Amino acid sequence: MNLESKNVTQVILEIKNLLETEFTNLSIVGEVTNLSLSSSGHWYFTLSDKDSSISAALFKMDALRNPLIKQIKDGAKVQVIGDVNVYPKRGTFQVIIKKIVPLGVGDLKEQFEKLKRRLATEGLFDLERKKAIPQLPKRVAIITALRGAALQDFINIYKRRSIWMDLVVLPTLVQGDEAAKAIRGSLHNVIKYSLSAPVEKKIDLIVLARGGGSLEDLWAFNDEGLAWDLFNCPIPTISAIGHEVDFSIADFVCDLRAETPSAAAEIITHQQTLIKEKMRTVKGRLISHMEIKISRINNRLKYAHPNTILNSIWTVFNGYQKRLIRCDINKRLNELTHIHEFYQRLDDCLEDIKNSMKDKMKALTHQLDKSKSLLNVLNPKNVLGRGYGYVETINGGIVASGQDFDKLTQDELLNLHFYDGKRVVKKADKSS
């Protein structure tokens, strides 16, 4: 039998042409999950019902014509109108939405809220009935998918932060119709094992872990039977399901909810991390104390060395020798008698006398010069040089006025003084 061979592109294009021409202007009713807005303004989400789901996209221009999209949340029930589109690169198809209308809360969301309210009234969520999480668990059982990212994240943190905790992994189906039954089975196996195990092998803590997903992906953890199993579990439990925004019934029933599997690992190993940090601190202090102790002992050994002792003796000897030298009176005569101070004071006094005599001589010389100048001014000879003269008796008396001249005797000799000499004259009779 000969069949015509086609490549992948040909097959995808034929499917694309068939679907896009056959399924146009569809009206679909479903529940919105995994709603997200891209940076370019396009909206992407999943339309689901109880048994199936399909990808959907509302591009930016159509979103502007449907402003109600901003009010729609995960779990909302909507009616959409659009066309089926095939994306050849990945071989997937989705509904390209042209119009979207909210119809209320979706069936899954409504079931979740009803079960949540009923279990709350029955006391499964009561805080006072929750068990305390052990701070230093020795053996922890984790119920999760063996190859899931949640387990790897948990193990990475466990290896980095834990000191002595043993980890027991129970590979379990965590998504799909059989997931709830599988999770309950793993939980029962852990409880049964722990009850019959010796004390050192008992399980101290159980963790339910799964990565993020849509409401229907996490639906196994909303099982009522699982909720009662967790409520009646004699071992403390932690739920680490999905991301921070994801909630399930198991989150409310477990003794503690962690936002993510990584957060659960951090909570469990927190006290161990504190102990490790304290041990590092104590280790550092011990090392520092020992180093100080060793340093002190080394110093004592160094001071006890013969060379050190000998050097110390020589230092003391040299000190005493210097003190003896300072006690020699002959070499310290001036210092002890203070004669050098008297010498210094005598030199200062001599210097002061010299300076005083110089100042006195300068003052007397200046006074003499002034007196000389004054005598020069009063010298009568200086006046005679301008054509004046004066009369003097033979005895040296000055004839200063006509009255003095009349008192002279007849024919008395007189000296007439001039600038360039003197002449002798005789007083004549008045009548002549």
Image (cartoon, rainbow, N blue to C red):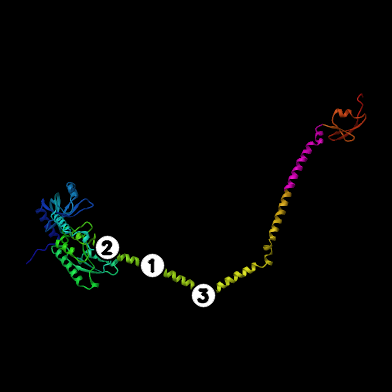
**x, y (%) of residue 101?**
14, 49
Q: Which residue is mark 2?
A: 267
- Identify the residue position indicated by label 3 in the image: 305
For the point 37% across and 66% down, the residue is 281
Residue 377 pos. (x, y %): 78, 36
Instruction: Name the quadrant containing residue 94.
Output: bottom left
The kind of residue tagged 2 is Ile
Q: Secondary structure at mark 1?
A: helix
Q: Earlier in the sequence, mark 2 or mark 3?
A: 2
Indicate the amino acid at tag 1. Gly
Q: Which element is circle 2 on?
A: helix
Task: Work out whether mark 1 precedes mark 3 in sequence or the reverse, and give the earlier one.
Answer: 1
Direction right: furthest residue: 411
Image quadrant holding the N terminus, namely bottom left
Q: Residues within 10 Å of mark 2 (few under 14, many from 20)?
A: some
Three-letter code, disc 3: His
Which is the main secondary structure of the residues drawn in magenta? helix
- Nearer the observer: mark 2 or 3; the answer is 2
Q: Nearer the viewer, residue 64 or 33?
A: 33
* Residue at the disc numbered 1: 284
Residue extending farthest to the front is 128
Q: Which residues are magenta?
A: 359-387
Residue 372: within the magenta? yes
